[in-house]
Image: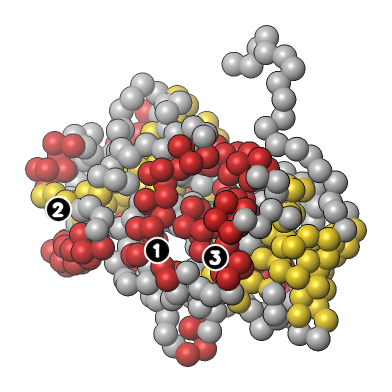
């Protein structure tokens, strides 16, 4: 597509690291870039840097299956994801960047009376939060998704919870959009710069050690998703986070066939169709802790089986490629955006398999915390000490559709 186009200017600068910044964000994924952007935009902090060990967007922000939704149940989560959805809805104008946000609607299927009850509760909670939810019966689902197998008896389709404002966005465009907008406001985006140590004096952070030298800062945010435990360990912390692989798959490009996001929680399978025509789908985690960003064959088989059960027509499509990303799994399925025991050191992690949709609100709330020292009201429950006090936000089930 770029054939013949010459002399294109880079979308952001490539600055050398300065000796000192007012604030440093470790990690140039979706959350790190959005944190930097909102620090600059909402709080006027522009002498800041994002330090990324690879290239911007090389982590999960460019590896996810792009689903955006606000269908969480528990207070603490629901207002946060609702806030995120509102930011998504204005994001392209705000960033002046086409992130291909497409509110094509998300349908969570249910397969038993008990599951229907749970989805009715969830739908009511979503509506109370100000988001949208519509309960579909079996015929309602058949009308919208006629290609599903309604005859299968192992997991008969009873209906679905339809979330019209849910949908997808182009994942790496989100990283690029935030990167360009942050750069424009003066943020230094420094690639190929791995943080190897966190400097602490008398209980206060003073800067970081990197593969491009030491950099001073009185505020440092750790926003490294799957690598959270490793980077936090540099500051002497042991996080309640396990890193696991989540795989995803895409088929060859096909003519439009799936015009929603469909989630089949019972079979651990979900699917949508990209604007390029590929069927994008995935399933469950590979069930062992790992820092390898690629998965293993048993889960490939499991995902393909689930896909065939739900929509046998998928057996006609050819899988083009598969990949994996490192998920920062928290014990209760909810994230952490909090201060740490070190003054000036903050952490944003625990996004499990659902952190893409959170990118705008996570950056918004992390920036608020780093600038003001106070938790943003919609992220007030994302405290690190909840695992010690027992005030957990157990919403792992929401992620059981793995998106
Ligand atoms: P990343 O992009 O991984 O950013 C972290 C960055 O930190 C990386 O670029 C890394 O290189 C950098 N880093 C690490 N260590 C260091 C260091 N020492 N120094 C400097 N930099 C460092 N979420 C959804 O909401 N919807 C979905 O449909 C969805 N599907 C998914 C499907 C798959 C297959 C995967 C893997 C994830 C999915 N997710 C989904 C989850 C989502 O992608 C993540 O929760 C989210 O992207 C994590 O935040 P991030 O973008 O900041 O992470």
Against 111, residue 381 (above or below) is: below
The residue that mark 1 highlights is 80
Q: Residue furthest top?
A: 4
Q: Residue at x 63, y 62 (%)?
A: 223
Say which label, 1 or 3, has the lower sequence index: 1
**Image quarter of residue 164:** top left
The residue that mark 2 highlights is 135
158 horizontally vs 103: left or right: left
Question: Crowdedness of circle 1 by 10 Å Cα count: few (<14), some, many (20+)?
Answer: many
What kind of colouring is applied to the model shown?
Answer: secondary structure
Q: Residue 52, image x and y in percent?
A: 73, 52
Q: Residue at x 20, y 53 (%)?
A: 133
Q: Residue 392, image x and y in percent?
A: 42, 81
The residue that mark 3 highlights is 368
Depth check: 103 or 283 in front? 103
Q: Is residue 295 visible?
A: no
């Amino acid at each position: 597509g770029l054939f013949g186009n010459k002399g294109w200017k880079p979308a952001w600068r490539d600055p050398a690291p300065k000796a000192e910044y007012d604030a440093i964000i470790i990690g140039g994924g979706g959350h790190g870039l959005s944190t930097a952007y909102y620090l600059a935009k909402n709080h006027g902090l522009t002498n800041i840097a994002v330090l990324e060990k690879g290239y911007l967007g090389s982590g999960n922000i460019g590896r996810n299956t792009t689903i955006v939704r606000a269908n969480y149940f528990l207070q603490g989560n629901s207002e946060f994801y609702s806030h995120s959805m509102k930011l998504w809805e204005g994001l392209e104008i705000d960033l002046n960047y086409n992130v291909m946000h497409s509110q094509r609607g998300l349908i969570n299927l249910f397969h038993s009376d008990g599951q229907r009850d749970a989805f009715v509760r969830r739908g009511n909670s979503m509506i109370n939060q100000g988001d949208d939810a519509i309960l579909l019966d079996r015929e309602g689902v058949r009308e919208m998704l006629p290609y599903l197998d309604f005859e299968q008896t192992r997991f008969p389709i009873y209906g679905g919870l339809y979330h019209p404002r849910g949908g997808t966005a182009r994942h790496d465009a989100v990283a690029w959009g935030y990167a360009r907008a942050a750069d424009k406001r003066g943020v230094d985006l420094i690639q190929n710069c791995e943080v190897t140590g966190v400097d602490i004096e008398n209980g206060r952070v003073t800067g970081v050690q990197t593969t491009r030298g030491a950099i001073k800062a009185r505020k440092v945010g750790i926003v490294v998703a799957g690598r959270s435990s490793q980077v936090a360990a540099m500051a002497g912390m042991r996080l309640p986070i396990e890193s696991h692989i989540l795989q995803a798959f895409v088929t060859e490009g096909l003519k439009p066939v799936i015009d929603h996001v469909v989630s089949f929680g019972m079979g651990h399978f979900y699917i949508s169709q990209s604007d390029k025509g590929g069927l994008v789908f995935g399933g469950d985690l590979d069930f062992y802790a790992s820092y390898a960003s690629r998965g293993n064959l048993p889960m490939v088989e499991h995902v393909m089986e689930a896909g065939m059960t739900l929509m046998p027509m998928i057996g006609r499509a050819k899988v083009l490629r598969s990949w994996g990303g490192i998920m920062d799994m928290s014990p209760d399925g909810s994230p952490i955006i909090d201060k740490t025991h070190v003054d000036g050191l903050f952490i944003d992690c625990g996004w499990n398999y659902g952190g893409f949709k959170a990118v705008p609100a996570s950056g918004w709330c992390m920036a608020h915390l780093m600038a003001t020292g106070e938790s943003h009201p919609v992220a007030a429950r994302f405290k690190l000490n909840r695992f010690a006090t027992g005030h957990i936000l157990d919403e792992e089930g929401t992620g059981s559709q793995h998106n």
